[in-house]
Image (cartoon, rainbow, N blue to C red):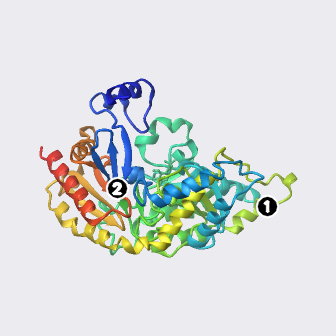
Amino acid sequence: MNDADLLRLDRAHVWHPCTQEKDHEQLPPIPIERGEGVYLIDRQGNRYIDGVSSWWVNLFGHNHPGLNQALKDQASKVAHHIFAGFTHEPGIRLAERLAELTPGNLSRVFFTDNGSSAVEAALKMSFQYWQQVGIPQKTRFVSIREAYHGETLGALSVSGCELYREIYRPILLEGFQVQGPDCYRCPYGLQRESCQAECFAPLQQLVEREHEQIAGIIIEPLIQGAAGMRIYPPIYLKKLRQLCDAYAVHYIADEIAVGFGRTGKMFANEHAEVAPDLMCLSKGITGGYMPLAVTLTTDEIYQAFYDDYTTLKAFLHSHSYTGNPLACAVANKVLDIFRDEEILDQTRPQQQLLDDWKADFEELPQVGEFRKLGMVAAVEMVEDKSSKAPYPWQQRRGYQVYQQALRKGALLRPLGNVVYFMPPLTIKQDELQQLLQIARDAIITVTRV
Ligand SMILES: Cc1ncc(COP(=O)(O)O)c(C=O)c1O
């Protein structure tokens, strides 16, 4: 089928995610034929550096021989089977390894198949735990304004990005939302490198006041992704852990985006040397190959569900593809690669390169801030640098950068006015250099008037 026919059918039948379909009248989706390392390659042979790891999932590049092999090996045994009443070695090994690798005592692993579902499971587990240990009034969750935890109704209820949730407000769960860290526009006039997370005060006050009805606090550790890669300091998480301990509230860490090496450590909580009570992982868990997610928790929480069947304490939550063996096999291979190829150490030069570009971006008249943690960096475009006034969202400056970058061979997918980089961890220095150059050029073009 030629491209024109393919796109006609796409227009006729496909509804793409997080997209105003009418935009496709001007810029149709690009049919991708194959991948090769950090590149996505379309049917005409055009190559695009995947600067966003295809929505933050890809870790070691596309079409990776080792991951391909792991998938083939498992497919030749069994692709999927029910995970209730049955189990399998890839799932067991993965659970054991994640329990070992994650911070603290997260010894129990509950499988789902996407990030939002991992969040749903965490919220339900936390809620049910309090019901079953005799504190049933703990029913509400706290989250940060601008947080993003997924699109299903529970996850959306604890998300703050108004863009995604405003219209659904009447059907969302009731919870508490507080102002979180916003280091670029810090209301206290402090620097993220030296502050004591003074912005923790609203959360502290809320929990002191309402803890009797609070089940848990959910947060994206260190980087609020969809909010525009807002980076905040580890001390915020240290304070959060202390607060949760003091008031018997669960700390739910959503490491779906930041887990698996993105921040320079395997898990973002390691920067703060704290451990959550529940932790959600997905995205990079299979290196961008298969839909898989997990909710990890402590034995203490697990034990509150462990009893005779007739007590009805079981966690009766399931998905058809729970613990998919193909996905688990690939996830095990991902962990092998992290270990055998010392991936975290290997990213050091690339992290340095990102640092080196800070000045090149910040010298631009319409760039307010270049921020970076590990292998994630973001450039915030502003209408006025001195007042930090954002461009009105209707101008779609980020979308214009996306269009410009595509023409030059890079996939960037800005979040509003924030152009960010979250490439595969194995991106080579020259590829990263090219990606940054394309982004800088695109920003100059788009902010000229
Ligand atoms: C921090 C965070 N939590 C949850 C999710 C939801 O994951 P999924 O899109 O797999 O449902 C995302 C997705 O971007 C995310 O970034």
Q: Is residue 336 left or right of residue 424?
A: right
Q: Nearer the viewer, mark 1 or mark 2?
A: 2
- Between 318 and 145, the one lying in front of the other is 318
Q: Few, some or many C-alpha atoms within 10 Å of disc 1 (few <14, some 14-19, many ≥20)?
A: few
Quarter of the image for the N terminus: give it: top left
Relative height, residue 409 to residue 262 (above, below)? above
Q: Real-space Cα distance between discs 1 and 2?
A: 45 Å
Q: Is mark 2 within 8 Å of ligand 1?
A: no
What is the number of the mark on residue 306?
1
Q: Position of residue 124 (x, y in %)?
A: 65, 52
Asked if 17 appears above or below 377 in the picture, the reply is: above
The tally of labels here is 2
**Would residue 222 be visible to someone looking at this image?**
yes
The type of residue carrying mark 1 is Tyr
Mark 1 or mark 2, which has the lower sequence index? 2
Q: Residue at x 79, y 61 (%)?
A: 306
